Image (spheres, rainbow, N blue to C red):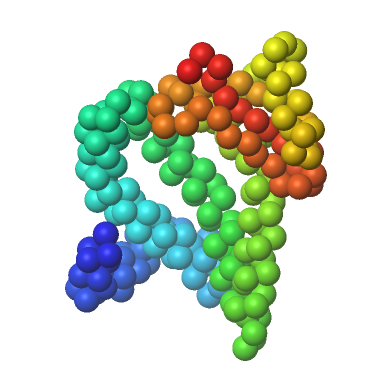
Amino acid sequence: MFMEGTVLIFLGWLPYAWDSAASLANSWQLLSLSRNDLHSEIIISIVFVCILGLHDTIFGLPFSLYQTFVVEDRHGFNKTTLALFFRDKIISLAIGFIIGAPVLSVVIWIIRIGGPHFYFYVWLFLLVISVILMAVYPTLIAPLFNKYTKLEQGEIYEAIETLARRVSFPLTQIYVVDGSKRSAHSNAYFYGFFKVSGRTILSFNPTD
């Protein structure tokens, strides 16, 4: 991938993609909706990033397919289906656009008004976005890929609670997730951002 990126840079891929984004935005009459240069730059930038993302997805697809259905399958780890694989790709692209477009718009705006220290304001903004995403991920994004159900009281529940108390882990909720429908690599993980999100999760599949 590094070699591919280097070759594309020397071949002028990025300027070509930017010019293509401007042409597409103009042909789709998106630029006519812009009230000033800032809006035009934002629209072209969003189309530009979409072109780059689509390019990376298409060119990276054979490697992803090989990794999942050949390498992983050869070692007995792969449990995903072709339909689930492409479903995940589509959802990931949609989420990337829904989150990335407004974030990119604000970044461009900050660069325009930030003056010589714009990089600090961009860093601060992206830090806040990262914290927000960490807080909302388990409730808004993760359920798009997996099904989460609360673990009923029982031997497993009590054992996990006992272990959490022993190591002073702030366990608040325990969920069962169908994570094993994709891979046999791991069947347990925890999630939490201190107590900001109010949702610390230990997810696993007890059937594994």
* Quarter assignment of residue 147: top right
Most distant residue in the front direction: 166
Q: Is residue 68 positioned above or below 37 on the image?
A: above
* Quarter assignment of residue 71: top left
Counting from the top left corner in percent of width and height, residue 16 is at 27, 70
State how many labels appear.
0
Q: Is residue 97 positioned above or below 68 on the image?
A: below
Closest to the observer, 159 or 199? 159
Residue at x 30%, y 26% (from the top left corner): 76
Most distant residue in the bottom direction: 116
Residue at x 36%, y 63% (from the top left corner): 21
Q: Is residue 116 positioned above or below 21 on the image?
A: below
Residue at x 65%, y 39% (from the top left corner): 191
Counting from the top left corner in percent of width and height, residue 60 is at 27, 49
Residue at x 44%, y 65% (from the top left corner): 44
Whether residue 83 is visible to the viewer of this picture, yes or no, is no
Counting from the top left corner in percent of width and height, residue 208 is at 48, 18
| Screen quadrant of the N terminus | bottom left
Counting from the top left corner in percent of width and height, residue 121 is at 67, 75
* Quarter assignment of residue 53: bottom left
Whether residue 179 is visible to the viewer of this picture, yes or no, is yes
Q: Decide if residue 156 is on the left or right side of residue 105.
A: right
Closest to the observer, 77 or 165? 165
Q: Decide if residue 75 is on the left or right side of residue 192.
A: left
